[in-house]
Image (cartoon, grey):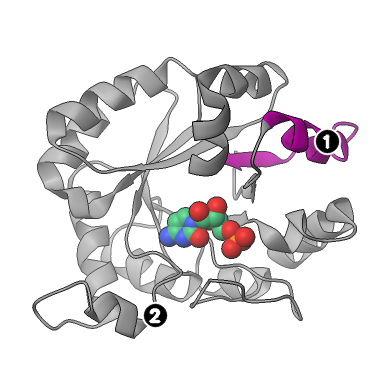
């Protein structure tokens, strides 16, 4: 799937999620969807299988971060669910990332989370001992992921162009922190619009609340698609 827009299904249970997805079932091109911790921990792998059977492209956002053997085995288990995208933390280091790559199977793409889009510069500085800026830190983690054979990164939109320069055009740059003009920032710190994200060189978008909290989710999704593709 080229330049996907993933709708973040940050819902508490399968029932709410099915109701939300009913809005999109009649579309010729079903949206790609992202299942995060909230929904996965509530409903488990069986619900992922259900949505896969219904033909959705699935991005499982579990942000794996553990010792290499554990992450490798977790990736092997997740590969059986036929999800197309999965996240790991770049901060897990090269050994962990390589173990993830070794176990991912043919169909799955691994995306490495650099710094959360909810982190401000100050939040990030509070987690580290040595001083480097947010941008330096993100570039460093992106290079580490690239050298480890990972397929792409998750970063703030404004960082996508730096990542592109330091890695390769083919390295995926998927960006959350997307808002339609006028929407609430919520807990995100580094946000931008779909068209700005495109200008920054993003290759895919994750959009949650701008669509899921909208009075008309299909119209909001279509607005995202049109801003993203124009
Ligand atoms: O509602 P909103 O568009 O802010 O949702 C963003 C989604 O992207 C959430 O599901 C969040 O977990 C995820 N995400 C993020 N920042 C990252 C990685 C994932 O916001 N760095």
Residue 129: x and y in percent read: 9, 76
Looking at the rendered structure, the number of numbered marks drawn on it comes to: 2
Label at residue 120 = 2
Mark 2: which secondary structure? loop
- Label 2–label 1 contact, CB within 8 A: no
Residue 9: x and y in percent read: 65, 44
Mark 1: which secondary structure? helix
Residue under the point 42% across and 29% down:
108
> Is residue 5 depicted above or below 72 in this figure?
below
Q: Is residue 63 visible?
A: yes
Q: Is residue 103 visible?
A: no
Q: Is residue 15 left or right of residue 165?
A: right
Label 1: few (<14), some (14–19) or many (≥20) C-alpha neighbours in 10 Å? few
Is 109 colored magenta in this rendering?
no
Q: Which residues are magenta?
A: 14-35
Looking at this view, is 186 or 86 the one in front?
A: 186
Looking at this view, is 38 or 180 the one in front?
A: 38
For disc 1, the marked residue is: 19
Q: Quadrant of residue 149?
A: top left
Label at residue 44 = none
Q: Earlier in the sequence, mark 2 or mark 1?
A: 1
């Amino acid at each position: 799937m080229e330049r996907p827009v993933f709708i973040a299904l940050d819902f508490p249970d399968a029932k709410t999620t099915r109701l939300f997805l009913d809005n999109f079932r009649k579309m010729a091109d079903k949206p790609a969807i992202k299942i995060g911790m909230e929904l996965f921990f509530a409903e488990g792998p069986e619900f992922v299988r259900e949505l896969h059977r219904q033909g959705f492209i699935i991005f499982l956002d579990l942000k794996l971060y553990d010792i290499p053997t554990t992450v490798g085995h977790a990736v092997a288990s997740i590969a059986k669910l036929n999800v197309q995208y999965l996240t790991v933390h770049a901060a897990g280091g090269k050994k962990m990332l390589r173990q993830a790559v070794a176990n991912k199977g043919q169909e799955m793409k691994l995306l490495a989370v650099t710094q959360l889009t909810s982190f401000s510069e100050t939040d990030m500085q509070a987690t580290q001992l040595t001083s480097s800026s947010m941008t330096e830190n993100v570039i460093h983690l992106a290079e580490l992921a690239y050298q480890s054979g990972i397929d792409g990164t998750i970063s703030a939109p404004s960082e996508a162009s730096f990542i592109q320069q330091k890695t390769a055009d083919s390295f995926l740059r998927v960006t959350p922190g997307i808002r339609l003009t006028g929407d609430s920032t919520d807990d995100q710190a580094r946000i931008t619009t779909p068209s700005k994200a495109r200008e920054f060189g993003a290759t895919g978008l994750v959009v949650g609340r701008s669509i899921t909290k909208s009075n008309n989710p299909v119209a909001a999704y279509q607005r995202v698609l049109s801003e993203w593709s124009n």
